[in-house]
């Protein structure tokens, strides 16, 4: 999927990346200090991270269906997509587990950390798709 000639997926993945790392930071400190403002920031980061992750999943899926089924990149793309979907589900579950007043719980924090770890691995596979397989790269004729 392209917008004005540029691939959209790499543009939108920056948002869930940042937000998925900020959510457990804010929530972890909020749990340690019983700080409601940090708890609200953690919840906001998780919510916006989830929304932007859904957008990243959608644009990535559009790119995936355009791959040739026999392409060597297909297997890597499937792993990348499953990991991204798993991270999104983990974050969504963490949001559901937030306690009364939408404050973080230890189980929600653990799921946010799992989501952040999954995003790191997902990014590695995404980089492999671009730099090893050349997915999304346009080669210009000389």
Image (cartoon, grey):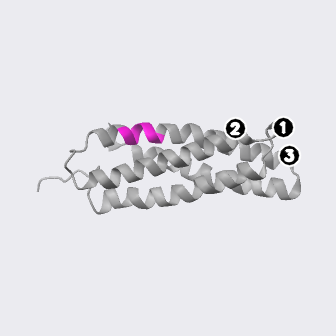
Snapshot quadrant of residue 24: bottom right
Q: Residue at x 44, y 48 (%)?
A: 82
> Which residue corresponds to mark 3?
36
- N-terminal of the pair, mark 1 or mark 3, is 3
Q: Along the line of sight, which residue is nearer the eye, 49 or 86?
A: 86
Q: Earlier in the sequence, mark 2 or mark 3?
A: 3
Residue 49 lies, in percent from the top left, at 60, 43
Q: Locate the C terminus by quadrant.
A: bottom left
Which numbered circle lies on residue 96?
2
- Disc 2 to disc 3, C-alpha distance: 18 Å
Let me know if residue 79 is in the magenta part.
no
The disc placed on residue 100 is 1
Residue 1 seen in this snapshot: no
Q: In the image, is 102 to the left or to the right of 135?
A: right
Label 1 secondary element: helix
Residue bounds of the magenta highlight? 56-61
Instruction: Give the residue drawn at x 46%, y 56%.
Output: 122
Mark 1 vs mark 3: in front: 1
Characterize the magenta stretch by its predominant secondary structure.
Answer: helix
CA–CA distance in space, label 2 to label 1: 11 Å
How many marks overall?
3
At mark 2, the secondary structure is helix
Viewer-proximal residue among 69 and 124: 69
């Amino acid at each position: 999927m392209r917008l004005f000639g540029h691939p959209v997926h790499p543009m939108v993945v920056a948002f869930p990346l940042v937000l998925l790392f900020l959510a457990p930071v804010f929530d972890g400190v909020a749990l340690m200090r019983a700080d409601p403002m940090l708890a609200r920031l953690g919840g906001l980061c998780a919510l916006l991270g989830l929304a932007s992750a859904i957008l990243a999943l959608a644009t990535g899926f559009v790119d995936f269906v355009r791959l040739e089924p026999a392409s060597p990149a297909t297997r890597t793309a499937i792993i990348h997509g499953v990991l991204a979907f798993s991270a999104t589900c983990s974050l969504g579950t963490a949001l559901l587990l937030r306690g009364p007043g939408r404050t973080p719980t230890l189980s929600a924090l653990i799921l946010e950390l799992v989501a952040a770890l999954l995003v790191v691995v997902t990014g590695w596979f995404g980089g492999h798709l671009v730099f090893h397989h050349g997915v999304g790269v346009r080669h210009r004729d000389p």
